[in-house]
């Protein structure tokens, strides 16, 4: 009440109060005070937001805040949606998830006046320290992007294709969902068009389920790399040295070096299969198809990349 009175007094012109001007002044001063009070406070909570088009585009955003209470609030969820709608306009897009550029820090907020205004309004309402942990935008013709968020926040009145939750993943699929299918539809004779369209829609719907289940698996299994070939050489060398040291300490020189080398390679392979997506056992496949690479082969698609926020 006192802050409202002071805002009216501070913005009065020749003794005349201007409510709209006072509201603007109040928002500006409250945001400034909130920034000062929250600066430096730890941010251990937050949310992620993902969206993807029917074919070839996806974007995501991860925001941090101080408390779980704030992260689950309608204000924070709405705020996440609004920012995700705007961020693809100001962040540099990528051509594939395998080379995606993840933007972080609040400098991208300051780069756009509309985003800055939305940010300041949310900051004044939530009254907690906030930060952009990561944001990306990707577009690639011939790929299909699928997303999954865990602990999805349900908001009434929204039908914008954006999912907001605690943690999430996006995957890029290629193969049976390629853009050539659209060209195939365009060139079909009219008598075959309906059948071709039906098959195309069925393929896309099937691929969306494959992709969503794969994204769900990624959130649950936390792979670090796509395949064995994606493990950096220094990591391979480091893990092999650790395994060899463990073997030598346990063996006490009883086995020949070549036997220890063979056992070490086997142990390394077991470790690698636990951190590489394509080698992991698919935990979300309803058919229990085994390794992720086998499930994808069965479905006629390949995974070109993934990202977890």
Image (cartoon, rainbow, N blue to C red):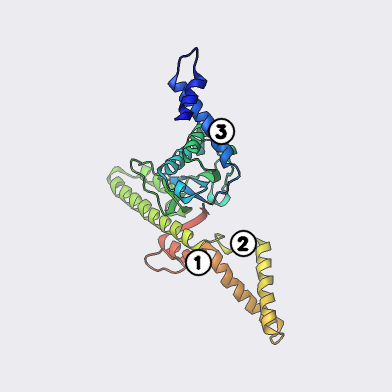
Residue under label 1, please give it: 280
Q: Residue drawn 42% across and 52% down?
A: 177
Residue under label 2, please give it: 231
Q: Is residue 262 visible?
A: yes
* Secondary element type, mark 3: helix
Q: In the rendered image of this protein, does residue 116 appear above or below residue 199?
A: above
Choose the circle earlier in sequence order: 2 or 1.
2
Numbered badge on residue 32: 3
Choose the circle earlier in sequence order: 3 or 2.
3
Numbered badge on residue 122: none
Q: CA distance from mark 3 to mark 1?
A: 49 Å
* Secondary element type, mark 1: loop
Choose the circle earlier in sequence order: 3 or 1.
3
* Secondary element type, mark 2: loop
Task: Tell me whether circle 3 and circle 2 mark residues in contact (CB < 8 Å).
Answer: no
Q: Quick one: label 3, few (<14), some, or many (20+) residues within 10 Å?
A: some
Q: Quick one: label 2, few (<14), some, or many (20+) residues within 10 Å?
A: some
Q: In the rendered image of this protein, does residue 110 appear above or below residue 289?
A: above
Tell me where residue 41 appears, x and y as whole percent.
58, 46
- Tell which tag, 3 or 2, sits nearer the viewer: 3
Tell me where residue 55 appears, x and y as whole percent.
42, 45
Q: CA distance from mark 2 to mark 1?
A: 14 Å
């Amino acid at each position: 009440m006192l802050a409202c009175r002071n805002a009216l007094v501070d913005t009065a012109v020749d003794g005349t109060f201007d409510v709209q001007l006072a509201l603007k002044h109040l928002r500006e001063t409250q945001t400034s005070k909130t920034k000062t009070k929250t600066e430096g406070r730890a941010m251990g909570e937050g949310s992620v937001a993902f969206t993807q088009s029917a074919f070839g585009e996806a974007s995501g955003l991860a925001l941090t805040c101080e408390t779980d209470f704030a992260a689950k609030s309608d204000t924070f969820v709405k705020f996440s949606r609004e920012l995700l709608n705007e961020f693809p306009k100001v962040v540099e897009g990528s051509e594939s998830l395998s080379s995606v550029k993840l933007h972080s820090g609040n400098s991208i907020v300051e780069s756009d006046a509309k985003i800055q205004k939305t940010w300041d309004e949310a900051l004044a309402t939530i009254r907690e320290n906030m930060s952009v942990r990561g944001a990306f935008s990707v577009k690639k013709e011939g790929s299909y992007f699928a997303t999954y968020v865990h602990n999805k926040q349900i908001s009434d009145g929204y039908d914008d294709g954006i999912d907001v939750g605690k943690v999430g993943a996006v995957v890029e699929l290629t193969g049976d969902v390629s853009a050539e299918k659209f060209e195939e539809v365009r060139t079909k004779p009219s008598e075959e068009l309906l059948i071709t369209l039906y098959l195309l829609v069925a393929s896309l719907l099937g691929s969306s389920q494959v992709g969503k289940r794969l994204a769900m698996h990624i959130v649950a299994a936390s792979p670090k790399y796509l395949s064995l070939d994606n493990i950096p050489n220094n990591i391979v060398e480091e893990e092999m040295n650790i395994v060899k040291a463990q073997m030598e300490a346990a063996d006490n020189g009883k086995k020949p070096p070549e036997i220890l080398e063979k056992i070490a390679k086997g142990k390394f392979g077991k470790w690698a299969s636990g951190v590489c997506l394509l080698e992991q056992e698919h935990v979300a496949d309803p058919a229990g198809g085994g390794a992720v690479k086998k499930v994808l082969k069965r479905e006629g698609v390949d995974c070109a990349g993934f990202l977890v926020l």
